[in-house]
Image (cartoon, helix red, strand yellow):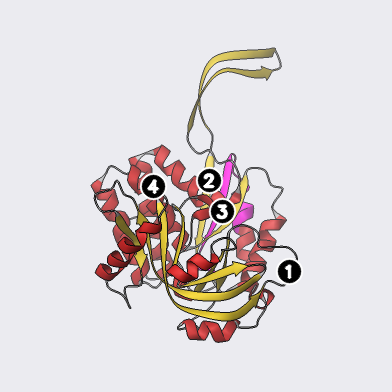
Amino acid sequence: MTEVSFFPQYEQKENKVTNYTLLVLRQIYNESPNLFQSFIIDLLADEGRNINIGVNFLQQVGYSCERGNSIIDGVIQQLPFQIFIETKTTDWFYNDQLERHIENLLNFNGQKIFIALANFDGLKEESKAFDAIKEKYKDEKDLIITKVEFEQLKYALENISDRIKSETLHNIIKEYEQFLDENNLLPTWKYRLDVVNCAVSKNDVINRKLYLCPEAKGAYKHARSKYFGIYENKNVNCIAEIKAVCMYDSKAKKNISISWFDSDNYKEEDIIKEATEKSKYCWDDGVQMFLLSDFKENINFNKDSRGGMFGSKIYFNFDEKVKDINDLETLIKNKKWSNFQ
């Protein structure tokens, strides 16, 4: 057992990544246990399970023993929890190793969470193997097994940033995000197609080169992607590049804030200028603006499974062979979704 340290002696990259990740999480817990719980709940939101790792204050709680029942007036309770994190930066997770980790985790009482931390984009077969293990343990009480990408971790940190009072913690998180980026742990957006249901707004999106949706919560929370696909009637017939995603707020000091933009090809001042001009289409505050360019039409990228698209969006992850939208057009034109799922 090795204590988490600000000065790790590890040489293996994944051990360093784990150490720095745990340092950030420890600092969040030190800031506030409630904040840490909110972070974990947001990180595991897709699991749809109740997660309680904080202190509960209860009253009039009933208990029973051999001598009978009793109702206690007040209870302060903290349930035990255990979180295992297995990190991979290059190699894949091995089934035998995963199952040993999970079996050991099951020996603990209370809430048990197993997090596989890695970049999963493009790893279809490996992801299926992971999902099979998750299915195997689905009936285990108080056990959550989940995959988390470094990018998801980054978003979960951003979601709690406005509740962090410590300037030191803000700086630690910024440095951690920079560390992930510099170590090529956040490259996946460059090869991702964000297919969005635009059945109602398709013409507006194409004519204005702009997609609008409410602020980034729930169904409207979009993972950073380089490409945008317009979905309608089981078909993506038009794709575009995403220049930037901005937020509009008329009450803020600056009406336009940039969530992110393609800094390799565009200047920040040009993005602000374009977003300001197109903000006239925003119906309210807290609107996300996807600035789009380089449209390609007549793509005919068909959903070949039954029914329409489940939810408002779906992602398709490719690899470094897709260097630009022309490569993407060539790859998916007249193809079916099942070819890439």
Corner quadrant of residue 14 = bottom left
Question: Is 144 placed above or below 54 here?
Answer: below
Q: Residue at x 58, y 58 (%)?
A: 312
Q: Earlier in the sequence, mark 2 or mark 3?
A: 2
Q: Amino acid at mark 1?
A: Ser
Question: Is 328 placed above or below 205 here?
Answer: below
- Left or right of residue 117: residue 131: right
Residue at the disc numbered 4 = 160
- Marks 4 and 1, Cα distance to the nearest angstrom? 38 Å
Residue range corresponding to the magenta coloring: 101-120
Density class for disc 1 (Cα within 10 Å; few <14, some 14-19, many ≥20) is few
Residue at the disc numbered 2 = 82
Q: Earlier in the sequence, mark 2 or mark 4?
A: 2
- Marks 2 and 4, Cα distance to the nearest angstrom? 22 Å
- Whether residue 329 appears in magenta in the rendering, the answer is no
Of tags 4 and 1, the one toward the viewer is 1
Q: Residue furthest right?
A: 306
Q: Position of residue 171 (x, y in %)?
A: 26, 54
Q: Amino acid at mark 3?
A: Phe
Q: Residue at x 72, y 72 (%)?
A: 304
Residue 305: which disc? Answer: 1
Element type at mark 4: loop
Of tags 1 and 2, the one toward the viewer is 1
Element type at mark 3: strand
Of tags 2 and 4, the one toward the viewer is 4
